[in-house]
Image: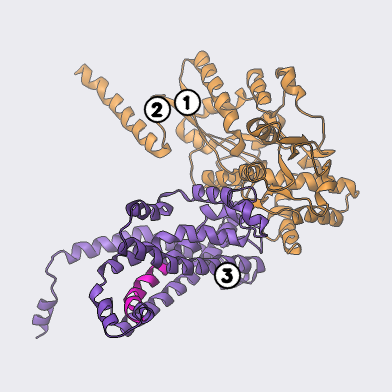
Chain colours: A purple, B orange
Amino acid sequence: MADSSRQRRRNAIPGFGLTMGYTLTYLGLIVLIPLGALILRASTLGMAGLWEILADPRVLAALRISFGLSFAAALLDAVFGLLVAWVLVRYAFPGRRFIDAMVDLPFALPTAVAGISLAAIYAPNGWLGAPLESLGIKVAYTPLGIFIALVFVGIPFAVRTVEPLIAEIDRETEEASATLGASRGQTVWRVVLPPLMPAMLTGFALAFARAVGEYGSVIFIAGNLPYLSEIAPVLIVIRLEEFDYAGATGIAVIMLAISFAALLAINLIQAWSRRRFGYA
Amino acid sequence: MVQWKLRAPSRRIFVAALAMSFVFGGTPAVAQTALLNVSYDPTRELYVELNKLFAADWKEKTGETVTIRMSHGGSGRQARSVIDGLGADVVTLALAADIDEIARATKKIPADWQKRLPNNASPYTSTIVFLVRKGNPKGIKDWDDLIRPGIQVITPNPKTSGGARWNYLAAYGYALEKFGGDEAKAQDFVRQIFKNVPVLDTGARGSTNTFAQRGIGDVLLAWENEAFLALNELGKDKFDIVVPSLSILAEPPVSVVDGNVDAKGTRKVAEAYLAFLYTPAAQAVIARHYYRPVKPEAAAADDMARFPKVKLITIDEAFGGWDKAQKLHFANGGIFDAMLQANR
């Protein structure tokens, strides 16, 4: 019995040993060893040292700015990314492929270039900055500027994760829903959106993770004023400039822990939504 | 047979050159000697010219070809790269504290490195001046004007920029003089300047951009050479240089990285390279690039006339040296951090 079940679990494609070995080596070299070194370095601080870093109001302010704005930016990305993906998949219009390619640009653009361009456009003397300034809205060198930079770098994640799922939606279910008397709102809310939820969450998580670690594009538009527009990665760089490696890794480890907790939470919500709606 | 013998080493050199080109991301070098000069941000234009001159000079004297590779970046970050193993033959950084840190962390440079070359191992000096909008609409004349309400001051973050540390110390030095050495009053003065700072860029070039291209702020605190460069590159009709009544003598020092040159066998040429910076030919180039030469007699009179006369304090006299100033002002939890906290 045990034998036959083991037999049945055998994969159609051989090579478990090889691929698993490769996976472990790869993960070890690329991910685990650097992260291990990070934690090892931070561990020279001890729990008391970490606590001291966390109790510093400036660190707290920077973490709040980093995670708060990343969360908001990822949320906006998830909503509008869905919209963009929907338009790109569902409707045929001239220039669609062009717009489709444009979505990936934030991936390809060096982040410093993105930051400088955004700062140039949103500065008080820039194309968008000048009219906004006359309305009393300051974008560049304020937290709003950081938010815009983070939305920018996150948008491809939100679009690309939901696109394939939208393409797979069976239109007949929508039609069935309509013929069974559901309103348009009900069809969108109860039929179209639920299967897209897990992908939206993945897009949200990726955009969020990217935003939390973003440095290059943000520093040019942030203003970097402590307690106001200083993101945690800038604070890490400042610690490094002080040759305070332990302090820098301390903040990094705290960020890592928060990110990990956030991503875990997102995964749990995802698992819940899968169970709830029965879709992958 | 003979042919084979000749070919093997040349192939090995080719492979080595190829490997080097991967390491440095440059073109494959055929030269026997290559030096890596790890420098700070605003020296790009200066060293392009100096390197050309030195290579020609070295070729003439020894018949050897030498190529010099440059690495530029924020002074502190560059120091960290060398500490983390970047194989610099020479370092030419913005402040002594960064080279001190390399010496302390790696022992590749002896502790008394600053005594090995003339003038505190600084072949050129600079100072901190103000760059203001054309016509000086806000009437900014001296450090006192920077604490006026409504004045926006642009400076990089002293934590991440060597130049900004000179800015900070120049302001602090002025305040010490003004208040007769009263530290508390001087700190309050500098704190008020930083209260007027709307953007803290991470490096000197970033601040210059913020001020010049983005139109933010009324006054930029800058290296004298950066201010002149901004004036020339971005338009004399847009900005004016204002020289405060007192500033600081900024000494960007140079040193051979002993541990690296001994391992690579490049000590002789590396030392010659740094000695070359003090020669009249190099000094003239230095003055042309708006750095103050340590041998003004070697520079063109026209170039020298551009440098305004200004009373300069030194870091050793006013602050007891870099080591002390660094710990007291810029360390985590130091005076600068306390100012930012008070400004919340």
Asked whether B133 or B45 is in front, the reply is: B133
* Residue type at tag 1: Thr
Label 3 sits on residue: A50
Tag 2 secondary structure: loop
Q: Which residue is drawn at 68% across and 30% down?
A: B124
The dominant secondary structure in magenta is helix
Question: What chain does badge 1 belong to?
Answer: B
Contact between marks 2 and 1 (CB within 8 A): the answer is yes
Residue identified by numbered label 2: B29
Query: Which of the chains bears the disc numbered 3?
Result: A
Residue at label 1?
B67
* Residue B169 sits above or below residue A187 on the image: above
Are discs 2 and 1 both within one chain? Answer: yes
Q: Residue at x 71, y 18 (%)?
A: B300
Closer to the chain start, of discs 2 and 1, is 2
- Write the residue at 57% across / 24% down: B49
Q: Looking at the rendering, which quadrant does residue A138 occupy?
A: bottom right
Magenta region, residue range: A190-205
